[in-house]
Amino acid sequence: MLNGISPLLGPDLLATLCRMGHGDTIVLADAHFPGESVGRRVLRCDGVAIPPLLDAILPLFPLDGYIDAPLAIMAPVPGDIPDPRVEASYRALAARHQPDRAHFTALERFAFYERARDAFAVVMTGDTAKYANLLLTKGVCAPPAG
């Protein structure tokens, strides 16, 4: 345990977030996502939903300010209707933690899988919401004040 660090962020996930460089991406994947098939590095956060995990990550993880959309969600397959609360919760968390970088895009399912193949890591969660997958692109950490 560490002061100021959410207990949802275990040592492997913290180390992964730290090792990522500017422009690297990480996928927060729902329980339906084929993480083991597409991910180079797969971390497990079973039993954890994506919104509280995102809420724990965003205070520590600078989103990329040099690209149009450092956050990408998986777009629903035509005919599927996603739960609008999923995207709304992500938008609210991003706006609260990094309002100047809370820009989203939606990627078609197979385009999302391609981005996931190139991601630094895939974090498999226990989130059972459909289309809850989220890709985050890391930016540059600000130098310490003072």
Image (cartoon, rainbow, N blue to C red):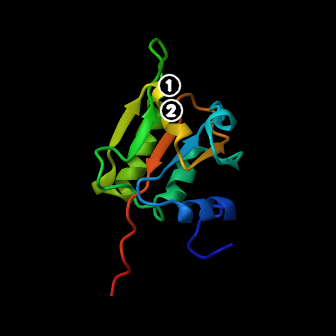
**Rendered location of residue 32, percent (x, y):** 65, 30
Mark 1 neighbour density, 10 Å: few (under 14) some (14–19) many (20 or more): few
| SS under mark 2 | helix
| Residue at horizontal 52 percent and vertical 58 percent from the top | 57
**Rendered location of residue 88, percent (x, y):** 41, 39
User: Quadrant of residue 34 in the image?
Assistant: top right
**Rendered location of residue 17, percent (x, y):** 55, 60
Which label is found at residue 114? Answer: 2
Q: Which of 94/120 is in front? A: 120
Quadrant of image for the C terminus: bottom left
Are the residues flagged by discs 1 and 2 in contact, CB closer than 8 Å?
Answer: yes
| Residue at horizontal 71 percent and vertical 45 percent from the top | 47
Q: Which residue is mark 1?
A: 110
User: Quadrant of residue 65 in the image?
Assistant: bottom left
| SS under mark 1 | helix
Mark 2 neighbour density, 10 Å: few (under 14) some (14–19) many (20 or more): few
| Residue at horizontal 61 percent and vertical 63 percent from the top | 14
| Residue at horizontal 37 percent and vertical 47 percent from the top | 70
- In the picture shown, does residue 75 fall above or below 92? above
Identify the residue at the far bottom of this view: 146
